[in-house]
Amino acid sequence: MVPEAILTILSTLTNAGEQAYLVGGCVRDFMLGRRINDWDITTSAKPERVQALFEKTVPTGIAHGTVTVIYDQAKAEVTTFRADGEYKDHRHPEQVQFVGNLTEDLSRRDFTINAMAMCAGGSITDLFGGREDLAKKTIRCVGKAEARFTEDALRMFRAYRFSAQLGFIIDDSITEAVAYCKPLAKELSAERIRDELEKILISDRPEMLHTLAEQGLLERFGIEKSNPIISLSTLPAERLVRWSGAFVCYPQLSKNVLRFDKYSQRLAAQTAELWNIPYSRQGCKHLIAEYGADVAACYAKGKGHFIDYEAILASGECVELSQLAVSGSDIPFSGPLVGKTLSEMLNYVLEHPEENKKDLLLARFLEQ
Ligand code: ATP
Ligand code: MG
């Protein structure tokens, strides 16, 4: 069902004499009966008109013709019909010319299943056989795959991403074009690739990552062939757990080439390094102490022992310096030896939880 508020946004535009359609992913997911994340609307109205017609708007990407309209708790990204290419007018690369109509707008889209529009009444505009490809569960480009990948090489990654998310097959025309166009992947920004890889990894078919490796799409990271040494789909579908699994299969990916934020990078890479350690309760306590609770949690999840990890934390047993009965101020000397002594005490307490007592520890470690 399309929410009432979204229908109102559409009718506000059409009542003002503009054309307006739902478009892209939301139409595809609507037809598949899948949960819809974002409502995208394509319209003949220029951004200033859209801003004037609605009370609450956010200029999300005015240069590309996109205004976010907020109405009655619902939100839609409303984009003016545009022709292909953000840089059509080379003299003014930041300014898109809104010369398009619905047909042109649909032609610039990547795959047939992503290139359908739906009006408020529910009728579908399908110029490229999207409906048929939905029925055949097939990912196929709008137009010639090779030309479309040459325009934007990210579409190669997007093809495998949608295949992983939807469980669709990739049309042979795409596989053939990828074999030819794969060197273009080198020109893409690492962030754009990372975002697509991440969607593959958290999908129901994370093993698609190996298909990308096989097809040569990861060559820019130094990955020449697939290396499925762990079963990614058996890991919980959590972002950093799956990334660390990916790093185990392809250590080359973890060398910061994907430009993660520092926290994610550290956590997934350290977890990957721990992967070969068999899980034990005692071992997990040491990992919490040494690497921090977040890395240990990620490791425990990957190993299928998260419940045990949570039980360790709930037990109140000392696993971190902050829980140690002794603190730096209890130690009668200063300098680097303080930290060393505290960490020796922590290591001892990890093995002897009942001895986490100030007097016992001070006696044991200081009076020798
Ligand atoms: P999701 O549910 O993952 O958001 P989506 O289909 O909405 O899937 P988006 O990346 O949000 O995917 O893009 C919205 C729409 O914009 C697509 O359905 C497609 O029509 C078009 N699109 C996005 N990226 C490209 C691209 N690189 N080339 C051509 N068309 C694209
Ligand atoms: Mg979307």
Image (spheres, grey):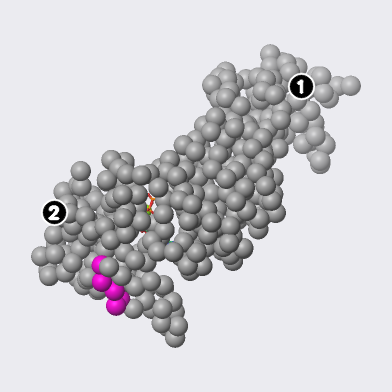
**SS category of the residue bearing label 1:** helix
Which residue is drawn at the image coordinates 55% and 29% (left, top)? 234
Q: Where is 327 relative to 172, above or below?
A: above
Q: Where is 341 relative to 77, above or below?
A: above
Q: Is residue 64 left or right of residue 330?
A: left
Check if residue 198 falls in the magenta segment.
no
Which residue is drawn at the image coordinates 47% and 40% (left, top)? 203
**SS category of the residue bearing label 2:** loop
Q: Which mark is residue 192?
A: none
Q: Name the residue beneath numbered marker 1.
A: 348
Q: Is residue 130 left or right of residue 265?
A: left
State the residue in front, 238 or 33. 33
Kindly indicate the quadrant of the structure image that contains residue 247: top right
Q: CA distance from mark 1 to mark 2?
A: 70 Å
SS assignment for the magenta stretch, majority: loop
The crowding category of the residue bearing disc 2, from other C-alpha atoms within 10 Å (few below 14, some 14 to 19, many at least 20), is few
Q: Residue lying furthest top in this view?
A: 354
Q: Looking at the rendering, in which quadrant would you find the N terminus?
A: top left
Residue 40 lies, in percent from the top left, at: 29, 57
State the residue in front, 114 or 333. 114
State the residue in front, 168 or 190. 168
Q: Name the residue beneath numbered marker 2.
A: 121
Q: Is residue 13 left or right of residue 199?
A: left
Which residue is drawn at the image coordinates 76% and 21% (left, top)? 348
Choose the circle earlier in sequence order: 1 or 2.
2
Residue 303 lies, in percent from the top left, at: 61, 27
Q: Looking at the rendering, in which quadrant would you find the C terminus?
A: top right
Q: Residues in magenta? A: 98-102
Residue 147 lies, in percent from the top left, at: 47, 67
Q: Amino acid at mark 2?
A: Gly
